[in-house]
Image (tube, rainbow, N blue to C red):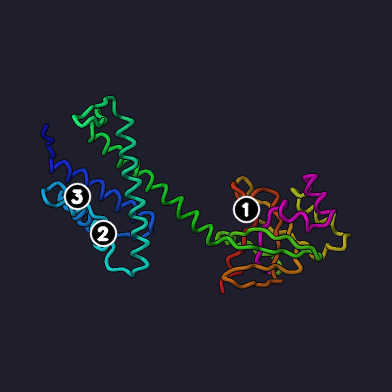
Amino acid sequence: MKQVVYIDEIFIVNLVMNLTALWLTSRFSGNRTSSFRMTTAAAVGCIYAVSIFFPGWQMALHLGLKLSVAVVMLVITFGLISLKQLLKQMAYFLLASFAVGGVAVGLDYLLANTLIMQPDNQSVIGGFNKWTSLVLTVLIVFITGKWGAAMWFKRIQQASHKVPLTVSLWGKEVCVPALLDTGNQLTDPLSQRPVIIVEFDALQPALPDKIVEMFANQQAQDGSRMMLALADTPYAKRLRLIPFKSVGQENGMLLGIYPDVVVIRHGGKSHIYKDVVVGIYNHQLSPESTYKALLHPQLLAS
């Protein structure tokens, strides 16, 4: 039984798959390139894929040649780059290729409704439209690349901006994960000291019992009354009210405290600050609890 191979179909399918994999590589690696470069590189990959079906070209299946073609495609797409960058791009490209191929195979099995027995007793799936499968593959990969890459970079950015923070209050210390937040521009209106926002639950072990009790009884919602209630305490001189805005609260007030000291570990160094204010926030800062404090960008600007 003769097998018929349609070279034009192989070329078109591989062109789309290669182009999709290269686009996904560009999205997740963060290296932008032109559509012309990606299309040219995808076409080179197609020529290689088609050559496999010519008699005497079985050597094209050699692993070394496959990797060499992949390198050529990446150089065409992203230009001449360092070896380290090339290896990084190669890793992204291989993962993207596996992902695209996996989606395509998965859709083939999902859409198939026929099992065909070949003369060599091997079974293959059928009963599906390969063009429908191809379009769905591109659509799924596009959605993943469009929004998945954005989430990926957001996570990476947050991870790179997260630092350990140690707050010392009245001789007690708490250590919390903090996020360097460029949107946190809070300062003490009187001293102009930058404000570090810390969740109450994270800061509670270092707080005086009187302050903990007031937060537990929801008395912290009225900042003025809270300051009056704490006016005769030994720690009143270190307390401040910090005006702030948040979602659903236009004119909020944070109870601020002058700490003994705060230590931020960043870049392999410990940065010690005394001229700051620690603002107590009685809610959760991160929905996933990945950080418990927000740093003022001024603190690590140097």
Label 1 is placed on what type of residue? Lys
Q: Which mark is residue 245?
A: 1
Residue 267 coordinates in the image, percent (x, y): 56, 70
Question: What residue sits right under mark 2 in the picture?
Answer: 64
Which residue is at a point 35% across and 60% down the rendered structure image?
89
* Residue under the image location 77 percent in, 45 percent down: 218
* Sequence-wise first label, 1 or 3: 3
Q: Which residues are magenta?
A: 192-219
* Residue in the foreground of this view, choosing between 252 and 88: 88
What secondary structure is marked by label 1?
strand
The reply to whether the C-beta atoms of the residues labelled 2 and 1 are less than 8 Å apart is no
**Residue sitting at x 41%, y 47%:** 147
Asked whether the viewer can see residue 220, the reply is yes
**Left or right for 160, reference 41:** right
| Kind of residue sitting beneath label 2 | Gly
Label 1 to label 3: alpha-carbon separation: 59 Å
Q: Considering only order in the chain, which callout, 3 or 2, is on the residue closer to the N terminus? A: 3
Name the one closer to the observer, 185 or 89. Answer: 89
Q: Secondary structure at mark 2?
A: helix
Above or below 150: residue 271? below
The mark total stands at 3
Which type of secondary structure does the marked residue at label 3 adopt?
helix
Q: Position of residue 206 (x, y in %)?
A: 78, 59
Dot 2 surroundings within 10 Å: few (below 14), some, or many (20 or more)? few
Q: Upstream in the sequence, badge 2 or badge 1?
A: 2
For label 3, the residue is 49
Q: Please give left or right for residue 289 compared with residue 157 in the image.
A: right
**Residue farthest toward the bottom in the current orientation of the protein:** 302
How far from the left and from the top, in percent, is residue 170? Answer: 81, 65
Q: Nearer the viewer, mark 1 or mark 3?
A: 3
**Which one is in front, 127 or 287?**
127
